[in-house]
Image (tube, coloured by chain):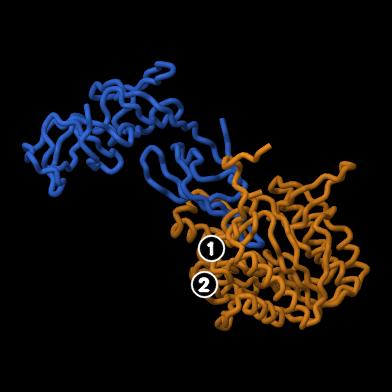
Amino acid sequence: MTAPSSSGPPWRPGATLTTLRLRAHLLQRTRAFFATREVLEVETPLLGHAGAADAQLAQFDVRLAQGETLYLQTSPEYAMKRLLAAGSGSIYQICKAFRAGEKGQLHNPEFTLVEWYRTGFTQRALIDETCALIGDLFGRALRAPRLLSYREAFLQALAIDPFVAPDRILADWARRHDPGAATLTLDRDGWLDFLFSMHVAPSFPRDRLTVIQAYPSSQAAWARTEGDTAARFEIYFGATELANGFHEATEWAVYKARFDEQERRRRAHGLPLIPADVRLLAALAEGDFPDCAGVALGFDRIVMLAAGAGRLDEVISFTIDRI
Amino acid sequence: MTTYSTNEFKNGLKILIDSDPCAIIENEFVKPGKGQAFNRVRIRNLKTGRVVERTFKSGDTVEGADVIDVEMQYLYNDGEFWYFMSPETFEQLPADRNAVGDAAKWIKEQSVCLITLWNGVPLSVEPPNMMNLKVAETDPGVRGDTSGGGGKPATLETGAVVRVPLFINIGDTIKVNTQTGEYISRAKE
């Protein structure tokens, strides 16, 4: 039997072979970076009985033969925290993470994360290390990162204080300056996300890292909070988000309360309920969870920027549209 | 009634916005790693041609617009409506001036046009890309000048005015590109 000549579906990779070689090289560099710092490489399961509590993340569910439901992990965070509670010390992982419904020029439902945890690190020490890794992977000298707080970023770009402005002011600003927002209805954090993504981040200087710190505590995720701010940071290159990190909360009660809060949000928005990770809670209750800071870095976006590309499709062998 | 989730958004999808039929021409997914996801889309209003921006919360649903493209043959106009016929069902449909738009100055009886229907009513009319049309009016031709340089305006049988080479005469049939309004060549009848 002869193969058909030309009418088959497109099968070629989106990334050129040159880009795939760069990708392989950057994986090696990442491992070398952590090896010299004596951070242990680990692997944790991509499947779990629990999924991320975060109501903003949609998970793929997978059925075991016996009919049990498992979830493809949206990040390796919970399993890595169990290793920390078991005394692993500083650890890193390069793995696939899965987020259903996230698809676009800068998103693919299956993507590669570099996630690491540093015991005894302050948030500032981890920011410096993350910027050092990004600079190393870009392979060229970057200007020193610009550090500012979430509040300063809003004040500079929009002249709005995100901590005190009433919801109505946030919505008014959006509707006045962005015709696309005319019919949007959002809650407070929704408006903050809208303004940050569409109007604050695009104002960051191109070709330079911007580090945002001190998020509102309503957006703490797993960061420690102090008063109305959370010890959470994000790193941007231009307007592109590259990394998200925390000075990690360590107490069982904090995790339990945030799992409950996310479950409440899921119920309120009619989203699928995801079982809380009882093994993580047990690790926090019984283990010796260390004082640590952790961060997740989007590896595909790093490759994209290092390659001078504009879309993930140019740096991933086969994105969702090609499988 | 069809509804689409933002996850199904793609270029060309027809949706109802402010009760007008629109086509998506650009769809950008925006999401902070932690936080609300959005679809920022640019849409063309198929009635007015205007392009607007709209941002949706990802996961929101939008009503689909029952918009289809069909080939129909132009029959005649009565000054108010232009009548088209389906070559398959012989069904006839009137299109108003708004829907016919610029196509009015290119089409003649039996021209096969692409009609965009919304709930079965013509929304827009696309003339054939190339038309052979007779010159109704132009300055007298210059015999022997086939260079095509210079040129002069000519009014065609359908009313369109195009620039033609000097050698073209009244009564000649020419081939024109209806998209650009350009003369292509002299044509046989």
Name the kind of residue labelled 1 in the image: Gly
Give the Cα separation between the discs numbered 2 and 1: 17 Å
Callout 2: chain: A
The residue singled out by tag 1 in the image is A310
Residue A224 visible in the shown view:
no
Q: Position of residue B85 (x, y in %)?
A: 36, 20
Instruction: Determine whether A125 is above or below A113 in the image.
Output: below
Quarter of the image that includes the N terminus of chain A: top right
The residue singled out by tag 2 in the image is A204
B105 lies left or right of B135: right
Q: Position of residue B170 (x, y in %)?
A: 11, 32
Name the kind of residue labelled 2 in the image: Phe
A263 lies left or right of A217: right
Query: What residue appears at the point 48 percent right and 44 percent down from the top-left corner?
Result: B24
Disc 1: CA contacts within 10 A as few (<14), some (14-19) or many (>=20): few
Instruction: Give the chain coloured blue.
Output: B
Q: Position of residue A303 (x, y in %)?
A: 62, 68
B157 lies left or right of B60: left
